[in-house]
Amino acid sequence: MNAPDPHADEASPGLAVSLGNFLGNLSALLGSRAELAAIELGELRDNLVRLLLVGAAGMLALLFALGCWTALVVVLGWDRMGWTILLLVALAWSLGAFLLYRQIRALLAPGKLSLPLTMDELRKDRDALLRGDGHA
């Protein structure tokens, strides 16, 4: 009969404890990352709602103003310029639209609608897991 290995019992509790610690740390890490993502998503939602509301109100006001000013310019300039006034007004509004487009792109470029902190932490976690050093 073979005698039981005295070292076999020592390895099992150590493995179970290590696995338990690993799962506990992994759970805590995932929980903290989920909390960070939730906070950033809340800020993202608030910024997006604010942008949409202000943008919608601004667009409505802009459309009314554009209609009134365009009609006034065309009526005042029609006797002297004829159809050329329509061309000038169209060019002016096209230039204005282009400038607004550039302004919107500049506002969105810094990443106000992204999750920079969460993505940075997830990159660090990925790198730590790939290295296998266990430092997160």
Image: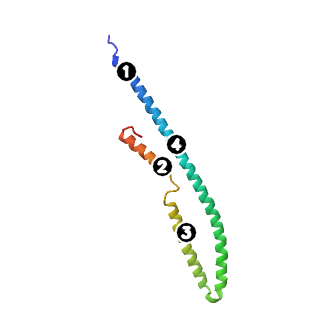
Amino acid type indicated by mark 1: Glu
Quickly name the residue at label 3.
100
Q: Earlier in the sequence, mark 4 or mark 1?
A: 1
Quickly name the residue at label 4.
34
Inter-mark Cα distance, 4 to 1? 36 Å
**Mark 3 falls on what kind of element?**
helix
Q: Nearer the viewer, mark 1 or mark 2?
A: 2
**Mark 4 falls on what kind of element?**
helix
* Position in image of residue 1 (x %, y %): 32, 10
**Mark 2 falls on what kind of element?**
helix
Q: Report the residue that reaches farthest toward the top.
A: 1
* Position in image of residue 50 (x %, y %): 61, 57
Inter-mark Cα distance, 3 to 4? 37 Å
Amino acid type indicated by mark 2: Leu
**Mark 1 falls on what kind of element?**
helix
Q: Residues within 10 Å of mark 4 (few under 14, many from 20)?
A: few
Inter-mark Cα distance, 2 to 4? 12 Å
* Position in image of residue 10 (x %, y %): 37, 21
* Position in image of residue 57 (x %, y %): 65, 64
Q: Residues within 10 Å of mark 2 (few under 14, many from 20)?
A: few
Quickly name the residue at label 2.
117
Q: Residue at the location (53% across, 55% down)?
A: 113
Please, is residue 41 above or below residue 65 in the view? above
Question: Dividing the image into 4 quarters, which one contains the C terminus?
Answer: top left
